[in-house]
Amino acid sequence: MKKIVFLTLTLLFTLQIDAQEQTIAVLRNQLDVIETEEKNELKKQIEDINSMFENRVINAEEAKRLKIKAAEARAWKIQERQAVILETIAILEKKQSEQEQPVRDPNIFLDIDSYFSGDVEPQQQPLPKRDTLSVVPARVKPQPVIPLKEGEVKSPTTLDLVVAFGFNNAIGEGRWQDLEEDRDYALYNSKFMEIGLVLKTPLTKKNGLRLKYGLSYQSNRLRPNYNRFFAEVDGQTQLRADHRLTASGFHVNNLVLPLHLEFGPTRKKQNRDYTYYSSSNQLKFGIGGYMGINLSAKQWVERPYYYRGFYWIGREEFKGYNINKEIYGLSAYVGIGAFSIYGKYDLNTIFQNAANEQQFVSLGIRLDL
């Protein structure tokens, strides 16, 4: 076994030395090529200078000065291009002289035999320091993808940005027909908006059932019809008409914690680290709810007024309404990929003490990004 290893190492050693000698010969030949190329370029420059002198573009003194300048520039160019090659040759010759020294540690063969027999581990020899300049950069081989074991599946929790927007309205005592008749609020001018961050945690191995939870900011807006606005009358909030108004609006802003169970098919995918089941670009259905607190509520009204011979539209804002501070409701969505049809319904009434108790109801588009 020792003889085989010795002969193998000797062969590899000889091949390495021959390769280095061939590389040095090629580099030395390249030195001559560089010098020839620069001399040919200098010859062309001299011919151009002589042509300008013959055509009396420049005089003899100027021609001589230009020739000297061109020769100096080409000499510096030769030196600059050959410097890297000369340094590389010096490094290779140094390596060659080091490799020609015989190995004086006979125990290395004993270590190799022991390594193949599995009795003891080979002695750890310190790795030689690599030179900072490499002659021919080695081509890096792509790392093979290690196949995963059967059943090695991970279900990581992911973070989504949720944006929802659409139409908003309010109903009381289940009077859904009020929405169609625009009895209290303008259907197409009352809007809602929601934005938040949501975590998605798989509840099953194949990710067919997911739990989505997070934090969202909601804004619900109403546009009363028929020149009406919200007013306090005998401690109760109700819609009152004012023929002087041209428009009015009511805004309620909430901070909520949404929670949904999401269902839908998945596809098995694999990356360099693990296998997982992805629900992207798949049909999905989510059902759940939300709870939180009210942040603010305000109302604005617009009415015309006469000033210096002209009618102007002025806006006033009012705050401090007896809004319910505790927010909770139901919500659901259905869609494909990042796009969904989204609906929500507040179970709490808008006002704590109102002549006509109503809840917000919304329908729109939801984006999970």
Image: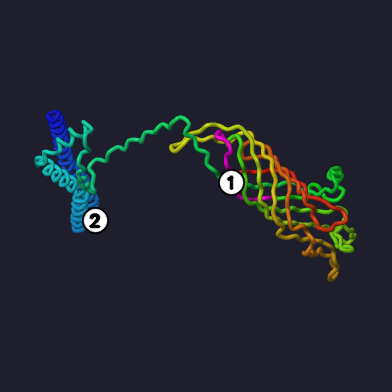
Q: Are marks 2 and 1 in contact (CB under 8 Å)?
A: no
Residue 354, position as x, y percentages in the image: 85, 57
Task: Point out the stretch of residues depicted in magenta.
Answer: 194-206
Q: Is residue 185 visible?
A: yes
Q: Is residue 206 left or right of residue 225?
A: left
Q: Residue furthest front?
A: 119
The quarter of the rendered structure image containing the N terminus is top left
Q: Which label's residue is closer to the chain start, 2 or 1?
A: 2
Instruction: Examine the rendered structure and indicate whether residue 22 appears above or below residue 77.
Output: above
Q: Point out which mark residue 199 bears.
A: 1
Q: Three-letter amino acid code at disc 2?
A: Ile
**Magenta span: chief secondary structure:** strand
Looking at the rendered structure, the secondary structure element under dot 1 is strand
Residue 72, position as x, y percentages in the image: 19, 54
Residue position for label 2: 58
The residue nearer to you, when weighing 78 against 240, is 240
Residue 279, position as x, y percentages in the image: 58, 36
